[in-house]
Image: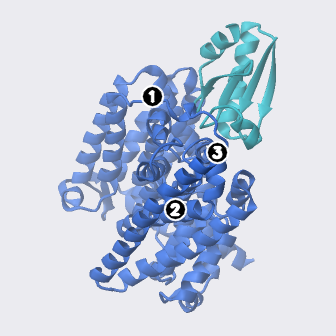
Chain colours: A cyan, B blue
């Protein structure tokens, strides 16, 4: 069971990232819990300088851009 | 009933005239430039100059660069502001960044230049740099204790380095060339190279219908829609449809609609650069220098875009499309509203309130900027309306400085990160400096001698440099004290 956090105040890119991450998990058949982190102070607890950020099991795997589904699958499988 | 119709008509007319005239050659390239900056400029290349141990001589200019190049959207502004404040160079550069980002980013400047004129854009950027750095330094001075004590976490966030590839730099410069070739009003661009006469008996009739649909009063600064304009609006709609199918899922790869949308965008820019004039029985098409310049710049874009790696290309197109989706609807609504409101405001009111470049006028302009919240970039068409209605350029500049910086929304956001006391100080400083900026620009427009303006700016620069020196010392001595204790 993976824990996936989406960091972002709710901008368009954050919603896009969440959709991609959910699709990736579903199509790879990986069970994951999705948590949206929208509070700015909580987001800053992670070391990122721009949103959207993607965190898999408390490790920041991408920030400031939208990864492809294939990338997210790799992170989830790792 | 007829009043309501009249108002709606004013709004629709303003919108149509606006879409047909101003938007294309400026906004279309500007969206692609903003997208390229967000997707292709590695943030680390600039943020590494914003770490906590950087000298103020470096961190303040870096904050300005970050504001103009990285921060075209709130996704970047808020986290970067908080990051610089909490983990990086501290309050001063964070404030400079926050001040510069909404008003001095390249999208806002390009838009200001094409709608209000290049002198407004140049003055806006110069005044923003001066007062952005000035307010940052003052804030750092006022609250230096706080900066010295802020948590000493690792600087690793700001230690990364990033380099831009050759293709990305080439693409960005080519896009800038498209923007300049499309908007500059210089001789070789405006010259007519060749003309051709198309047989189009419908052109004259169509123009008459357009004038009937969108009646305009040139004396009030209104513009109508030309035959060319109607063609451009049609192309815009087609781009929108193609982009919806081609760019919505671009991060997973392009499809046929993607290329169609891009080809339509190029065609629109070239059409906008032509000059189409309806004559008695046909349509005169004039090939201008602008068409050639835009064409060459577009070819350069294509050349460099093909060298980009797929991920970069997709990210660029996605960010550009996202800006369109985010900003364009707001602009459409904003411009429509401006058209409606313009019908209600008597020029005499504006001239009485802000027709002169004095303290009251500048104060009123700043107050208006604080209490009115317009979404990103809508402040520009609003400013255009005020200019047409007889507002003095000085107070108008004061409004342009304060409106993007001070809105209820941004104040709440800033307060959540730096606290109420500092936010209050920031708001007060921005209000005062916006008035100063308006007075200076107004004096320049009124023909105050360049020597006086130069002297004023030189004095400001001297004060800024002195403060940077003092400021550089303060935290260091404070840090030493902290270590002894």
Instruction: Determine which of the numbered discs, if any, sits on residue B137 in the image.
Output: 2
- Residue B279: horizontal and vertical position, in percent? 30, 63
Q: Foreground residue, B466 or B298?
A: B466
**Is residue B12 visible to us here?**
no
State which tag comes first along the sequence, 2 or 3: 3
Q: Residue at x 69, y 55 (%)?
A: B414
Q: Quadrant of the N terminus of chain B?
A: bottom right
- Give me the C-alpha separation between circle 2 and circle 3: 17 Å
Residue A42, relative to residue B257: is it above or below?
below
- Residue B361: horizontal and vertical position, in percent? 55, 86
Q: Foreground residue, B12 or B213?
A: B12
Q: Assign a secondary structure to mark 2.
A: helix
Instruction: Determine which of the numbered discs, if any, sits on residue B259 in the image.
Output: 1
The chain holding disc 3 is B
- Residue B214: horizontal and vertical position, in percent? 53, 68
- In the drawing, does residue B240 fall left or right of residue B190? right
């Amino acid at each position: 069971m993976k824990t996936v956090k989406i960091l972002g105040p709710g901008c368009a890119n954050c919603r896009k990232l969440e959709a991609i991450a959910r699709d990736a998990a579903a199509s790879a058949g990986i069970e994951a819990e999705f948590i949206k982190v929208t509070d700015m102070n909580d987001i800053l607890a992670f070391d990122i300088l721009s949103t959207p950020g993607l965190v898999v099991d408390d490790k920041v795997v991408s920030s400031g851009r939208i990864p492809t589904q294939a990338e997210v699958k790799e992170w989830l499988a790792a | 009933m007829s009043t309501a119709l009249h108002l709606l008509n004013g709004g629709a007319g303003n919108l149509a005239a606006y879409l047909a005239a101003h938007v294309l050659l400026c906004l279309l390239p500007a969206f692609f430039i903003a997208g390229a900056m967000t997707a292709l400029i590695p943030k680390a290349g600039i943020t590494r100059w914003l770490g906590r141990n950087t000298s103020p001589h470096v961190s303040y200019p870096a904050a300005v660069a970050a504001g103009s190049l990285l921060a075209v959207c709130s996704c970047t502004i808020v986290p970067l502001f908080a990051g610089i404040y909490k983990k990086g160079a501290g309050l001063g550069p964070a404030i400079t960044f926050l001040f510069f980002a909404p008003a001095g980013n390249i999208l806002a400047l390009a838009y200001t230049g094409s709608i209000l004129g290049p002198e407004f854009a140049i003055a806006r950027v110069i005044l923003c740099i001066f007062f952005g750095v000035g307010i940052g330094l003052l804030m750092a001075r006022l609250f230096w204790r706080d900066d010295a004590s802020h948590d000493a976490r690792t600087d690793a966030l700001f230690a990364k380095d990033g380099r831009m590839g050759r293709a990305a730099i080439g693409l960005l410069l080519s896009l800038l060339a498209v923007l300049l070739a499309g908007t500059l009003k210089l001789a070789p661009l405006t010259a007519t190279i060749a003309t051709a006469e198309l047989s189009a008996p419908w052109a004259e009739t169509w123009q008459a219908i357009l004038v009937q649909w969108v009646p305009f009063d040139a004396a009030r600064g209104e513009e109508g829609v030309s035959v060319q304009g109607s063609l451009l609006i049609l192309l815009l709609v087609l781009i929108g449809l193609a982009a919806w199918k081609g760019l919505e899922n671009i991060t997973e790869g392009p499809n046929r609609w993607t290329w169609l949308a891009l080809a339509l965008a190029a065609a629109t820019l070239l059409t906008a650069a032509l000059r189409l004039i309806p004559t008695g029985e046909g349509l005169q098409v004039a090939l201008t220098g602008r068409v050639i310049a835009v064409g060459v710049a577009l070819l350069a874009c294509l050349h460099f875009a093909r060298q980009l790696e797929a991920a970069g290309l997709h990210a660029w197109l996605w960010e550009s499309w996202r800006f369109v989706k985010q900003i364009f609807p707001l602009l459409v609504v904003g411009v429509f509203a401006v058209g409606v409101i313009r019908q209600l405001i008597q020029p005499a009111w504006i001239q009485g309130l802000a027709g002169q470049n004095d303290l009251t006028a500048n104060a009123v302009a700043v107050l208006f900027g604080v209490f009115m919240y317009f979404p990103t970039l809508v402040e520009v068409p609003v400013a255009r309306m005020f200019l047409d209605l007889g507002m003095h350029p000085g107070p108008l500049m004061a409004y342009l400085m304060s409106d993007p910086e001070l809105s209820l929304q941004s104040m709440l956001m800033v307060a959540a990160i730096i606290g109420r006391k500092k936010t209050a100080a920031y708001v007060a400083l921005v209000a005062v400096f916006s008035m100063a900026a308006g007075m200076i620009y107004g004096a320049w427009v009124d023909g105050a001698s360049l020597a006086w303006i130069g002297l004023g700016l030189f004095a400001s620069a001297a004060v800024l440099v002195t403060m940077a020196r003092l400021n550089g010392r303060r935290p260091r001595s404070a840090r030493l004290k902290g270590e002894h204790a």
